[in-house]
């Protein structure tokens, strides 16, 4: 695996690697890799000749009051994990490489898709995500890009951007990877204390119970929401940010549990904001 930090270098390496019609699978990340990221990297390598990953803690997707400074970083460990997962090229640019002096162009997907759920509590977040993802796509020119289902809204927003801006890139969305007790993997899980780690299980447990309610025929959005709300409130350190039930692709509100259903939740456990979701196809 080759590690490069400059845009000209990654372009050169990709050009060399793709002159035999090789396809490129790309996994953009912010590092501090866990099994969720590694599953994306393995899929990228299995489905393409060349697997490229990036590690870049993108400042434009953090609000001033968020955890940009303390976001966990460990490049040496990440590089070793990425290599084992089959990554051929690892792009690790500095902030000035992506946002040089004078940078002044942003990509913003407008409307409900970015202004609700996480977009409501983190204004500007998705503008930062689409700007950096768009730049990374222009640099790497991948055939396929790999994202985790855990960031369901991010997936919907990026897919809208790809359609709207005519990018010829296919997204591959890989399932949420969980600890054996159900907690969805996240780089931010390291912030949790021992007690908070236990309390955090309330997210996946509530989604699992909601799934059972739906499977046994409950189609009432408000009943499912109320149930999740009450359940999560029972955990001492939990503060609910949102519990939403929407259409998976458009993120529009739904009246009944039918079709492509996404139950998306964001909860602060102590000071750590966690997200989780459940995607279902209900006939
Ligand atoms: O999901 C993430 O880690 C980030 O939002 C992404 C897609 C790498 C953009 O910075």
Image: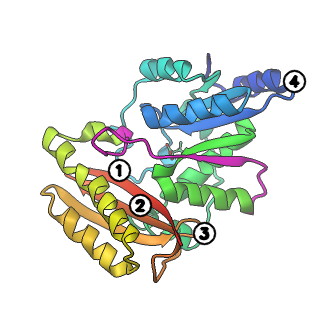
The magenta-colored residue range is 164-187
Given contact means CB atoms under 8 Å apart, are the residues at marks 4 and 3 in contact? no
Q: Which numbered disc, 1 or 4, marks the residue that appears first in the sequence?
A: 4
Q: Which numbered disc, 3 or 2, marks the residue that appears first in the sequence?
A: 3
Residue holding disc 4: 20
Distance from Cα at disc 1 to Cα at disc 2: 9 Å
Residue holding disc 1: 66
Kindly state the secondary structure of the residue where label 4 is placed: loop
Which label lies toward us, 4 or 2? 4
Q: Residue 79: x and y, percent?
A: 50, 20
In depth, the one of 75 and 59 nearer the eye is: 75
Which label lies toward us, 4 or 3? 4
Residue 48: quarter of image: top right
| Residue at x 18%, y 65% (from the top left corner) | 233
Mark number, residue 122: 2
- The crowding category of the residue bearing disc 1, from other C-alpha atoms within 10 Å (few below 14, some 14 to 19, many at least 20), is few
Distance from Cα at disc 1 to Cα at disc 3: 22 Å
Residue 217: quarter of image: bottom left
Q: In the rendered structure, does residue 157 fall within the stretch colored magenta?
A: no
| Residue at x 68%, y 35% (from the top left corner) | 25
Residue holding disc 3: 110
């Amino acid at each position: 695996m080759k590690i490069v930090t400059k845009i000209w270098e990654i372009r050169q390496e990709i050009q060399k690697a793709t002159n035999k019609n090789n396809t490129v699978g790309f996994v953009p990340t912010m590092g501090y890799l866990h099994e969720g990221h590694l599953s994306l990297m393995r899929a990228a390598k299995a489905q393409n000749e060349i697997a490229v990953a990036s590690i870049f803690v993108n400042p434009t997707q953090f609000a001033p009051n968020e955890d940009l400074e303390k976001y966990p970083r460990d490049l040496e460990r990440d590089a070793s994990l990425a290599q084992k997962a089959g990554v051929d090229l690892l792009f690790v640019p500095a902030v000035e490489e992506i946002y040089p002096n004078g940078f002044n162009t942003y990509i913003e997907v407008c409307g409900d898709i970015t202004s609700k759920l996480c977009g409501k509590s983190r204004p500007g977040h998705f503008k930062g995500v689409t700007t950096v993802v768009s730049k990374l796509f222009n640099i790497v020119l991948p055939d396929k890009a790999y994202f985790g289902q855990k960031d369901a809204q991010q997936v919907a927003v990026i897919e809208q951007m790809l359609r709207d801006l005519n990018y010829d890139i296919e997204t591959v969305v890989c399932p949420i990877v969980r600890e054996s007790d159900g907690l969805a993997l996240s780089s931010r899980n390291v912030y949790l204390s021992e007690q908070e780690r236990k309390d955090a299980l309330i997210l996946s447990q509530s989604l699992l119970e909601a799934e059972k309610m739906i499977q046994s025929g409950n189609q009432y959005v408000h009943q499912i929401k109320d149930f999740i709300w009450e359940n999560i409130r029972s955990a001492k350190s939990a503060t609910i940010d949102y519990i939403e039930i929407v259409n998976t692709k458009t993120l529009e509100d739904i009246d009944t549990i039918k079709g492509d259903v996404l139950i998306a939740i964001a909860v602060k456990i102590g000071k750590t904001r966690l997200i989780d979701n459940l995607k279902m196809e209900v006939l």
